[in-house]
Amino acid sequence: MTTFEKIKKKVFDVYYGIGVVAIGVMAASVIFSVIMRYFFKLSWKGLGEFNIVLFAFTTFWGMGICILKEEHVMIDIFFDKWSARVKRIFSIINYSIVIIVLVVFTYYSFGYVATVGKQISQGMEIPMYYIYGIMPVCGVMGIICTGLKIVEFALAPEEKFASKNKVLTKEEGVK
């Protein structure tokens, strides 16, 4: 395992762990709030808002996990037909475009947080920049994750770009 692969694995393990903890807390919190509401007729607006914040956090945080694991939507019927060299080039170009989009998203989300962040949330009664701050933080993390993927594509052996979806034909046994 190369130094880059070790660093990438450590980054992913920490990043993934934070996501798992957030989803676990969200699941427990939602289950608790549903039980309290339906069985005991108790609800707390702060807890409801906290659940929404956790949902938003896990959604944006999951973006980086999808990038690192290559679990995003991809239509690769033509991509699989290209040579490894062409796939490498297009993968780097594709992820460079993703970085550009994330930079724009992060830039504008910082502006948004600065504009509306001083308001106080109705449920948890905290400044909104804690809540809206999820966007720029996760944008920066997405940029880091995408940068790691670009480096990985640049350093990867040609086997990394082997076809992932084999279309079977009648000659190969499909009738």
Image (cartoon, rainbow, N blue to C red):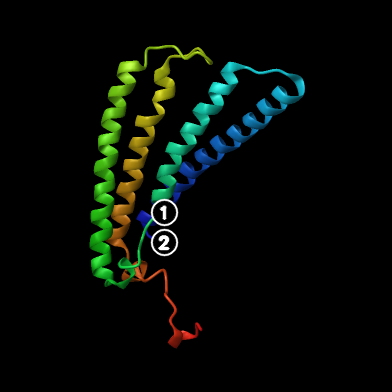
- Which of the two residues, 157 or 85, is positioned nearer the viewer here? 85
Residue depicted at x 30% and y 33%: 106
- Which of the two residues, 102 or 122, is positioned nearer the viewer here? 122
Corner quadrant of residue 41: top right
Q: Where residue 137 sits in the image (x, y, percent)?
A: 37, 31
Q: Three-letter amino acid code at disc 1?
A: Lys
Horizontal placement of 165 versus 98: left or right?
A: right
Q: Where residue 151 sits in the image (x, y, percent)?
A: 29, 54
The residue where tag 2 is placed is 1
- Which of the two residues, 89 or 30, is positioned nearer the viewer here? 30
Horizontal placement of 49 versus 157: left or right?
A: right
Furthest toward the front, the residue is: 175
Q: Which mark is residue 6?
A: 1
Horizontal placement of 125 versus 138: left or right?
A: right
Residue depicted at x 25% and y 56%: 92
Q: Is residue 148 above or below residue 114?
A: below
